[in-house]
Amino acid sequence: MLDIFMEYYPLFLSGLGVTVFVTIISCFSGTVLGTFLALGKIYGNKFVSAVVRTIISVIRGTPLLVQLFIIYYGLPSWGINMSPITAAIISFIINSGVYQAEYLRGSIQSISGSQLKAAQSIGMTKWQGIRHIILPQALRRVIPSWTNEFIYMIKYSSLAYVIGARELMTEGKLIASRNYQFFDVYLVVALIYLIVIIFFVAIFNRIEKKVTIP
Amino acid sequence: MPTKHLLKIEDLHHSFENEEVLKGISFSLDKGETKVIVGPSGTGKSTILNNIIRLVPPTRGKIYLEDTEITSAKKINEIRQQIGFVFQDFGLFNHLTAKGNIMIGLTKVKKMNKKEAEELAMLELDRVGLKEYAASYPSQLSGGQKQRVGIARALAMQPKLILFDEPTSSLDPELTGEVLKVMRNLAEEGMTMLVVTHEMGFARSVADELIFMEAGNIVEQGNPEKLFTDPDHQRTKEFLFQLTDLYGEGEN
């Protein structure tokens, strides 16, 4: 097994690089998207919150793979072409954003309305109150779910192999189809995922501890 | 209509769904005055305070802050900067230290620079006797300390008046004294205050005027000594005696 890694490590590592890159971009951009969706759903007017609800139910109600195919294979018929990695990142951002919106909504709603009232009582506008008082607390509370989402995303990003984005899973498949040592190659791939996830979980747990409100 | 009162309330009505909780309240507050509103629970006392800064917009009636009619003023957040509010449940921002709670309004609302805001925050914390707790988070403070930070936060905004919504009702009896002492000092320093409370001792000794409310109406208002010893209405007498019995004279 180690020999396989040693032999092909540039390929494994470049695949891993793509996996981590796609995951980080998707997760963080997903947080931004999710924040706007959650705020739209909670504080938006009837129209905004209905739009957000629809987006969330459509994205949550369809498989990620189908979304990926629509973006990569479907959009070109509208004249929109993109590389596999771009297509993967876009569909992951949308998918993750929607899930994160729901985590964040729960987190925002767990912070009592009196916090916003207090913010307004000192002359903050509603938006200032949300930005300076509600979100800093809500984002802290959402870190455990966010860590979970990140772990999912590292693993789900392997779906990108079906459209040929050269992430870790794709590289594994290419190596295995060259040397036929399927068991060992995929075991190496699995171990790499495991190690990377353990590493990130440790980091996020530290961050969570560091920013926790006494 | 211009007025020389600092705060003037005219024929204030408020309804929650179909229930009318305020049925035409009128009174005024002059600069430097402390008025205390007392009355049974559910009488609409807190609603008046919430109506004033429009955390709950009034159904009908007019409220003036000096010459400005604030019930319909567009920029309510600018009005709120001028009126401090102290909450029953403290309303401290949980993610900020005591100092941070005071600074955030100064930096984000008043656009004061950080250093000035910090100096003012320390000054106000000192004023309520909590200078050494500047770095503590709300969860690390006792109820009385939290409320004093709440008062310091309101003070730092340099408001024209402060509204107190049952500021000691969430506190253990032994902690109310420290909060009432801070409020008493403020009254003596000439801060204009409108206080909803059940603390009869405070009402009797600090208020310039006592307002007794029941069922959405003002039953009687006037000099606290008179209301306590020789009220015009039998109901006032019953209520004040009952509460004095229940809560005692408060502060010891």
Image (cartoon, helix red, strand yellow):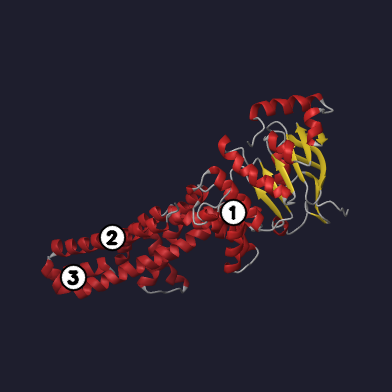
Q: What residue is disc 2 on?
A: A197
Residue shown at 64% from the left, 44% from the top: B181
Point out the tag, 2 or 3, that comes first from the N-terminus: 3
B141 left or right, relative to B247: left
Point out the tag, 1 or 2, that comes first from the N-terminus: 1
Look at the picture and state if B34 lies above or below A168: above
Could you say where residue A131 lies in the image, as x and y percent from the top left? 56, 60
Look at the picture and state if A97 lies above or below B241: below
Q: Chain of mark 2?
A: A
Distance (Cα) linking label 3 and label 1: 50 Å
- Quarter of the figure with residue B115: bottom right
User: Looking at the image, is mark 2 or mark 3 nearer the viewer?
Assistant: 2
Could you say where residue B222 lies in the image, as x and y percent from the top left? 82, 37
Taking depth in this image into account, of B248 and A115 the one nearest to the observer is B248
Residue shown at 22% from the left, 71% from the top: A12
Residue type for callout 3? Ile
Mark 2, Cα crowd under 10 Å, few <14 / some 14-19 / many 20+, is some
Helix, strand, or loop for circle 2? helix
Q: What residue is disc 1 on?
A: A43
Residue type for callout 2? Ile
- Quarter of the figure with residue B21: top right
